[in-house]
Image (cartoon, coloured by chain):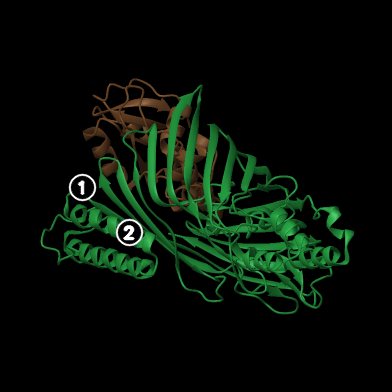
Amino acid sequence: MRLRSSLLGLILFACGTLARAEELVVVMAAGSGVEQLSREEVANIFLGRFRQLTDGRRALPIDNQSFKEEFYRKLVGRSPAEIGAYWAQLKFSGRTQPPEQEDESRALAKVAATPGAITYLERSKADSRVRVVLELGH
Amino acid sequence: MGWGPIEDEREISGGLGNQPPGDVEWGRSVFAITAVTQIGIFMKIAACRPKIRCCVAALCAFVAPAAKADDGMLHFSSFGTLGAAYHRADSIEYRRSIDQSDGAMGGKVNYDIDSLIGVQLNANFGQGVEGVVQAVSRQQPENNWNPKTSWAFLRYAPNESWEFRVGRVGLDLLLFSETRNIGYSYLPIRPAPEVVGLSSIDHLDGFDLRLRQPVGTGIASLKFYAGTSQGKFYNGGLREQAKAKFAALVGEYALDDLILRAWLGSARLRDNGALEPIFVFLRGTGSPYGAALADQMQLQDETYRYAALAGTYNHGPFQFQAAVTRMGVREDNPVLPILHGAYFVAGYRVGEFTPYIAYARAKSDRREVAADLSGSPQGAFLKNFVTSLTINSVQVDQHTLTLGLRYDISSGLDVKFQLDNVRAGRTRLVRNLADTTLDPRPFNMLSVALDFAF
């Protein structure tokens, strides 16, 4: 009985892990005119180093709170605490502000409606309103 | 001021997007009241400083109409540190900055050198215009904790390439100089006090202009800033820093995990600051030696030059920062000797823990007054007088080895434990109060600090 419970627990854990292991992608509005962005360009936008698209428009980064930790680990290899410290440095020296913080549905809606907006989510959530501009892998 | 009750349901809507409808009105009211209250506090803080009063008044003039606009947004944030430091070296006083009136004394737990609290208000007016006001309460050279305005400026960024700020802006002198009060933003409890702590000036009344452009896969930026500074420090009593006109260039290149930054600047000193009474005395003696000494030590119209090179590298769990600095006036002025500084900080994150090691070193090139002044008893007397009173007290020879552990409790909150081994010769930060002519002996200091930034 104990063995069966353990196995069941293990299977549920594995399923959970697999579910979370879906690929994370960076998206912009389908009509944004942006086909693809490099990892460096996305890092520059989300870290506030240079928030401008190649056509000259301003980029508006939006953090998807559901996958924020995973996103920054994949993109720049930094933990949430390191990202927090980084933004404290920029924010309190009066430089620039961190990306807007939104839940997934609002982030997606905003990106779909705003040409320069950019966010990240699981590939399966990227519907026809948005275009994948960078794949971050599993 | 134009800050009436909230009449339009849409006003100041930023930052409240996810609240249930029933809470929105209440939330907006609280947000607006908080913002107005904070501006009131800032105005009170700035009330006795004419230049800052002008900046804050200009800021409020912008804020009032913008706060009623749909796209207007006020953002209030705060930061602080609660710290305690302890060492057992009798009669030795340790300060992290020369503007602190009291330091950590041997055998007593000190809560003052690292503790502080600060608030910041950002007002986004749209069209690339933003106003920022920050005030910090910490141990002041006047031996009180009255809050002071760190910055109060208007920022205009028409696009990502250009940024212009005018008002009271941070003095960008070293890696940590603009964020020295934000403990949450760096690894050690004290960022290289040997180098950063020797300046009591952390802001300018002036402007800065920055140009940024992608170069290769990185971002290059060049900043020019200019303005005037004045400050106070504590050296056995409250002292005035010489007023100065600053102008500097700061270049930066950010590439993936690596950021390189270089500074080249100068400050034209406009008066003699705390040394003026000594010069008055020397000239008042009627002795040609006195006048010659005063001429040699004169600060007014001197040009103080500084150069620094720094790099930060952050790859995965590993982070590293290092810098070298050189600052001082012309070679033969003994009052502001050439000061060499260097430091590094390295940390390796393991989960929420980040053990770190740091080392900082600062040393001045000692200059004596001209030797020919000792040709007469009067000259020798005056030479000894100024040597003991000024030249000895401006020398720097200090290095610190630091081991520490940072634990990130949650987002915006950390606690740090740190052990410093301080070795100081002549320095303004560590003094032997039993006999100030003696060099302090080496000692170890234990510190703990709780930082927050929200």
Q: For the residue carrying disc 2, how many other residues have a C-alpha within 10 Å: few (<14), some (14-19), or many (20+)?
A: some
Give the residue at the far left of this rendering: B7
Counting the numbered discs, the total is: 2
Which chain did the image draw in brown? A
Say whether residue B421 is visible.
no
Which residue is nearer to you in this view: B13 or B169? B169
Left/right of residue B391 with respect to residue B197 in the rendered view? right
Question: Color used for chain B?
Answer: green
Q: Position of residue B92 (x, y in %)?
A: 77, 73
Chain of the residue that carries numbered disc 1 in the rendered image = B
Name the residue at 55% across, 57% down.
Answer: B201
Report the mark closest to the observer, 1 or 2: 2
| Secondary element at tag 2 | helix
Label 1 with label 2: CB-CB less than 8 Å: no
**Viewer-proximal residue, A35 or B130?**
B130
Q: Which mark is residue B373?
A: none
Q: Quadrant of residue B19?
A: bottom left
* Rendered location of residue B419, percent (x, y): 73, 63
Please name the residue shown 35% across and 66% down the image: B42
Q: Against B385, is B314 above or below? A: above
Which kind of residue does numbered mark 2 sit on? Cys
Graded by Cα atoms within 10 Å as few (under 14), some (14 to 19) or many (20 or more), the crowding at tag 1 reads some
Tell me the residue at 50%/24% (across/down). B217
State the residue position of label 1: B71
Q: Is residue A60 above or below residue B69?
A: above
The amino acid sitting under disc 1 is: Asp
The quarter of the displayed image where residue B26 is located: bottom left
Residue at the spot of label 2: B54
Tell me residue B223's x, y (percent): 48, 37
Frontmost residue, B259 versus A100: B259
> Which chain does tag 2 point to?
B
